[in-house]
Amino acid sequence: MDRPFIFINSAISADGKLSTKERKQIRISGQFDFERMDDLRSQADAVMVGIGTILSDDPSLTVKSPERKAARKAAGKSENPTRIIVDSSARTPVNADIFTKGDGIRIIAVSNAAPTENVEKLEKMALVIKTETNKVDLSELVGKLKKMGINILMVEGGATLNWGMLSAGLVDEIYTFVGNLIIGGATSPTFTDGEGFSEAEVLELELLSMEKIERGVLLKWNVKGNRK
């Protein structure tokens, strides 16, 4: 399938959690990792999150560094990459930060099960892409993104979207900053939730690099078998 180069970037606790049992983000990494993430975001054509991340954290997904924004504009791009929300039921609030902060294209990916009223509201705020399934078909979506000129797609989670992308074989690389925290909790989101793989299906990774930064470690992985 013709699709963008896709990578997941995430900060997780030492026990693999993305956030607390209240599904609230806490600071896992420091300023160096924040700058690394901002640089990755500035180099991507698009950044994608799931509706759960929007509802719990309300991120703007903008490039923060003035120098990086200026470099994008100098290259003929908007200050921010295209910002994408995977939102099968069209639940994205119309006052979400993604709509009110920063320039650039916004895309909401919905399914054919999304309420028409919700979709119509979002169409006033963003480009709405619909897949003809009861939940967003991620393979179909990334194929459409490629046709729109998106060649590098950064996925910033959360756990449900990470699972969907990985289980569909749509991820090329994974970057995880593992911080020096234990969060715990049976209901706390992990790096990937979803149904999980059986023993015969488990996804194998190849370690590309490992670097100690701040009070944690940055791991870079290749997802084996995905266009490599």
Image: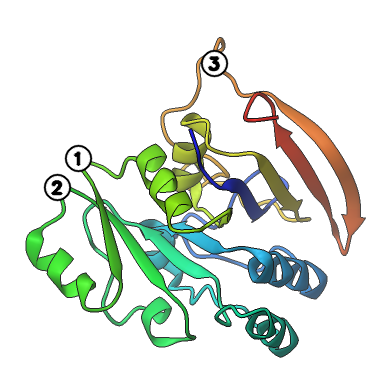
Q: Earlier in the sequence, mark 3 or mark 2?
A: 2
* Residue 107, percent from left and from top: 36, 65
Marks 1/2: CA–CA distance: 5 Å
Dot 2, how many residues are within 10 Å of its Cα: few (below 14), some (14-19), or many (20+)?
some
With 30 as the anchor, is 167 left or right in this view? Answer: left
Task: Judge depth for marks 1 and 3 and give the one in front.
Answer: 1
Relative depth, front residue between 179 and 45: 45
Residue at 50% x, 58% y: name it.
149
* Residue 8, percent from left and from top: 61, 49
Q: Where does the C terminus fall, quadrant-wise?
A: top right
Dot 3, how many residues are within 10 Å of its Cα: few (below 14), some (14-19), or many (20+)?
few
* Residue 100, percent from left and from top: 39, 86
Amino acid under disc 1: Asn
Give residue 134's mark.
Answer: 1
Relative depth, front residue between 101 and 82: 82
With 87 as the anchor, is 187 left or right in this view? Answer: right
**Could one spot residue 161 in this view of the protein?**
yes
Q: Which residue is mark 3?
A: 201
With 202 as the anchor, is 196 left or right in this view? Answer: left
* Residue 20, percent from left and from top: 53, 57
With 186 as the anchor, is 184 left or right in this view? Answer: right
Q: Residue furthest right?
A: 212
Q: Quadrant of residue 15?
A: top right
Is the residue 195 above or below the residue 102 in the image? above
Q: Which residue is mark 2?
A: 113
